Image (cartoon, rainbow, N blue to C red):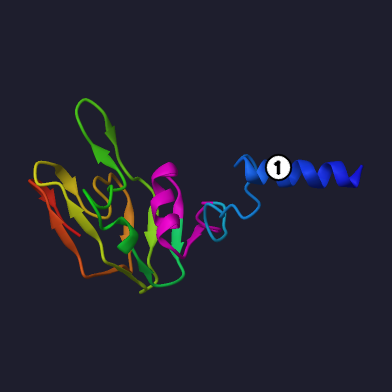
């Protein structure tokens, strides 16, 4: 029986249906004010877009160099008509840096690490080596 289960797992991995080393969405926390999601790499920063009303705390310096190609980083929070999808949570960078933010969308609006926020709190953040090309409402 153990041999059958082992072969099923091996076959699943080979077929791409089982991911034994799947990365966690965040480094910890549950997104509440007392237990914010912990952010320690670029994928964690990218995952913020799926929890726009939650609370986050950065725990390491982060580079976004893997997102520096083509149009670059896709900002968290959008303001597009007729829909508005703002970031409304909190982000505490704790003085750590986020570097290599690149956005190349010369005809787009509301560009930055966070593209559109509404009632959000962003604090203790440091952006380093930022390059953004956009039309209106562009910033780090």
Please provide percent x and percent y for residue 94: 40, 71
Please provide percent x and percent y for residue 85: 31, 36
- Residue pointed to by mark 1: 11
Please provide percent x and percent y for residue 92: 39, 64
Q: Residue at x 26, y 28 (%)?
A: 83
Indicate the secondary structure of the residue bearing disc 1: helix
Magenta stretch: includes residue 99? no
- Looking at the figure, which quarter contains the N terminus? top right
Query: How many numbered discs sit on the rendered protein?
Result: 1
Residue 24 lies in quadrant: bottom right
Q: Residue at x 43, y 49 (%)?
A: 47
* Residue segment shown in magenta: 31-55
Magenta stretch: includes residue 33? yes
Compared to residue 10, the image places residue 85 above or below, namely: above
Query: Residue placed farthest to the top in the image?
Result: 82
66 with respect to 101 (left or right): right
Q: Residue at x 41, y 50 (%)?
A: 48
Compared to residue 34, the image places residue 2 above or below, namely: above
Compared to residue 130, the image places residue 25 above or below, namely: above
Residue 82 lies in quadrant: top left
Please provide percent x and percent y for residue 89: 39, 49
How many other residues sit within 10 Å of disc 1, few (<14), some (14-19) or many (≥20)? few
């Amino acid at each position: 029986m153990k041999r059958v289960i082992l072969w099923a797992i091996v076959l699943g991995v080979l077929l791409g249906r089982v991911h034994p080393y799947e990365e966690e969405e965040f480094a910890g926390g549950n997104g509440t004010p007392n237990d914010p999601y912990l952010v320690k790499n670029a994928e964690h920063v990218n995952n913020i877009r799926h929890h726009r009303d939650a609370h986050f705390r950065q725990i390491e310096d982060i580079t976004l160099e893997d997102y520096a190609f083509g149009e670059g980083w896709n900002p968290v929070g959008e303001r597009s008509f007729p829909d508005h999808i703002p970031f409304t949570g909190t982000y505490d960078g704790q003085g750590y840096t986020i570097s290599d933010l690149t956005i190349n969308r010369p005809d787009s609006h509301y560009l930055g690490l966070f593209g559109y926020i509404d009632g959000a709190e962003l604090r203790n953040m440091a952006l380093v080596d930022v390059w953004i090309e956009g039309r209106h409402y562009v910033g780090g």
